[in-house]
Image: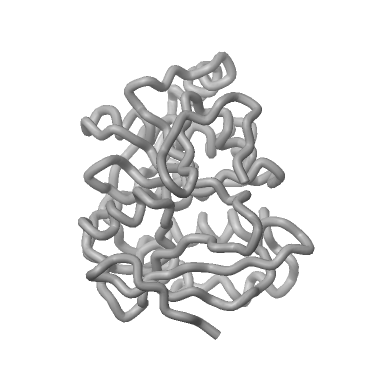
Amino acid sequence: MTSQVPVHPNLRLYLTGDHACSYLPARTARTLFVDPNVRVDRHHANWLQQIGFRRSGDHFYRPACRNCGRCVPVRVPVADFQPNRSQRRNLARNQDIELRAQTPAFDQEHYELYRQYLLARHGDGDMAEEITPQSYRQFLLAPWAGQSRLLEMRHRGNLLGVAVSDLLSSGLSAVYTFFDPEQAARAPGTFAVLSQILEARALGLDYLYLGYWIAESRKMAYKANFRPMEAWTGKEWRYLRAGEALG
């Protein structure tokens, strides 16, 4: 069951009923989402990003849970970012990786790596049936009115990973990253974030948006390592102090 929430004069937002939380066990969640029949342009996408929305495929959404604010939208002001010791080691370890920016298009090599990554991270027997070229296209290649980029990570021509991001007027928005599970020692996820920070800086953008940080979620904990970091409080963006948790 959904209900309409009028927030923007040119967009209709809807609120779902309660459903199981995808991030924290034994919790229920609600989701605020943009009318899926509306084609969101870059202007609206940038506005939605500013108030904590994310894009998945051609859908824009934001958690709107009862009595819970643990999903905290975060962004890195790229001009102020300085890699810590561990991140400097990561950059040195991966200095032999070639980065190639590509426009969004289906690539069989990308899809096979995506499938390999998901099966290694989330494979449970039924997962293989859910990973199809169509589901891959819908999630990462869905057309929308803005610009997206695929940042390939290659070593001696071999594909190690792909970072998908949206190009907005205020910054890059990191959508999703997948990589070769056998290359985990390189920490390619961290390298992808660092590379996108450097790319945003080179493009003259102000921020890299990292989506939702959840202090209690092991999968989300890495985002707190990129400092300084700003968090959306529901009213404004402000610097997040070390050790601070919102919600």
Q: Is residue 112 above or below residue 166?
A: below
- Residue 179 can be seen in this image: no
Q: Is 143 above or below relative to 156? A: below
Q: Position of residue 197 (x, y in %)?
A: 38, 31
Instruction: Name the residue nearer the viewer: 175 or 101.
Output: 175
Please report the residue visible at 22 percent of the width from the left and 63 percent of the height from the top: 41
Q: Quadrant of the N terminus?
A: bottom right
Q: Which x, y percent locates residue 246?
A: 60, 41
Q: Position of residue 198 (x, y in %)?
A: 34, 28
Using the image, determine if residue 245 lies above or below residue 110: above
Residue at figure coordinates x 60%, y 36% from the top left: 222
Q: Is residue 53 visible?
A: yes
Work out which residue is located at the far bottom of the displayed protein and give it.
Answer: 1
Along the line of sight, which residue is nearer the eye, 91 or 174?
Answer: 174
Callout count: 0
Quarter occupied by residue 61: bottom left
Location of residue 123 by image quarter = bottom right
Q: Nearer the viewer, residue 51 or 218?
A: 51
Q: Position of residue 170 (x, y in %)?
A: 26, 41
Single out the residue that lies furthest toward the top. 85
Furthest-right residue in view?
26
Q: Examine the image and state in which quarter residue 157 appears.
A: top left
- Identify the residue at image location x=40%, y=60%: 55
Query: Which residue appears at 34% of the width and 35% of the height?
Result: 207
